[in-house]
Image (tube, rainbow, N blue to C red):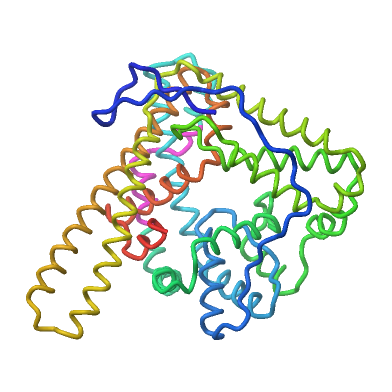
Amino acid sequence: MLITSVSNSPQLYSKQTVLKSQSQHKTSPIIKNPVVDKVSFSGLNPEIARNQLKILLTQDIWAPNLRIKMPETPLEKEVILEILEHRLQLDRLVRLTNEKLNIKTKIKMLANLMEQNPSHPDLPALRKEIENKGNLDSYLKTLDKNIELEQKKKKPALEYFKHIDELEEEYTAKHLLKNSAFDKFWHKIIKNNINPDGKLSTQELIDIIREDKAPVVERVIKTTSPILSKKQLLSRVQSQYEQMLREGVDVYKGEGNHNDVAKQARKTIAETYADSIKKQAGIDKQLTKIFESVEQKYTFKVDRLDGIDIYPIGEIWKDMKADEKSIKQITQEISQLKEKLAKTPDSQDLKDLLTKKETELQNFKDEWVSRLGFSVKYEGINRERMVEADRLPEYDYLTSENKTIKKHKRIFDIYKTNNDTIPETMWAEIIA
């Protein structure tokens, strides 16, 4: 399941990578009644437990439409409300920032279509949407001015989240929060999201949580999921499995076998619908057919992109991962050197070594940022080529939920709005 990079694709580095699409792979049978991993804060210092919750609950805090689960404890409720009250103050800033990114993307797409595919059916609507903005220079300057104004007006709320970023860096360094905890907690949020269609505002989420009153749709799902009819079960499994593959399968990855993603997705579904599966005799074969059908759909869309010239940005991501590993290691070494220097402040050898390590760290960070720019730039070019080849729907299906692409675009947007600088507090997230 890979996007093909043909042999004459422009290369980012001196090496050439040819990624081939594979239309068949084996998947394992559904696993029944597995043990569900839990996230626990029992026995922790109250302040540490509170800070851990702040960190875990703000993983998606800058998304336009927040994903939130109902709190399970009084402490979690208190922390969620505190977080949402601060995010409420920043809703306009988030909207303006996303609006700026959106219009710049559409301006670039319009220019590309007008030059290379002036008869494309999307062109009139895209041109009209942009023309409705009026003078683009003035429009963008107004956006920048409003963003800057919001940043100044809402500085305390921004500082609140900056402090949480600092806590995350501290807690991960001290092993008070393991990387696995982030994924487990995020899975719980996704699974129990009370804002699945993204229609609830921040204020509405505050009201719901304050009143301990989840939306009706969520209560119905929770009460009916153990006793789903066969039709309901099969429908939900198909929808959920498809979403899991879209999020988990990286079509830019230089390997063909994604059985691990499929296996984990099936395991999660087995956990989620264990009771319903037990009550539906002989449903295993139907579930397997659904899994295979979804995989065939996914593979078909990959094959539809075969032969289109693209940049193999998966190779950039590999180098970025290597940079992240080096940044993490050198950061730890610097921390250890500072501890030693605190004990022997007159040691010139330690001072020299610390200076050397700090220079190395900055060089790796600069390399990572440079590659971030290439990642965003060339993914955008790949997208434009899909537009030219009339394959954008297939490409969007395969990449719109890609975690790396989404992460890189989000960080790059912050980088550009922060005077071409990545906030120091964000590096903990990058190397996590």
* Residue 335 place in picture, x, y as percent: 27, 72
User: If the image is split into quadrants, where does the N terminus sit?
Assistant: top right
* Residue 133 place in picture, x, y as percent: 45, 39
Does the rendering let one see residue 245?
yes
Question: What residue lies at 69% left-to-right and 40% top-to-bottom?
Answer: 241
In magenta segment, residue 139: yes
Does the rendering let one see residue 155?
no
* Residue 107 place in picture, x, y as percent: 40, 33
Quarter occupied by residue 157? bottom left
* In the depicted structure, whether residue 324 falls above or below residue 153: above
- Which region is colored magenta? 129-146
Task: Give the left or right position of residue 225, taking residue 174 as reference.
Answer: right
Question: What residue lies at 61% left-to-right and 24% top-to-bottom?
Answer: 24
User: If the image is split into quadrants, where does the C terminus sit?
Assistant: bottom left
* In the depicted structure, whether residue 196 falls above or below residue 136: below
Task: Give the left or right position of residue 303, taking residue 431 as reference.
Answer: right
Quarter occupied by residue 294? top right
Most distant residue in the left direction: 348
* In the depicted structure, whether residue 173 falls above or below residue 187: below
Task: Give the left or right position of residue 257, taking residue 341 as reference.
Answer: right
**How many marks are shown on the rendered structure?**
0
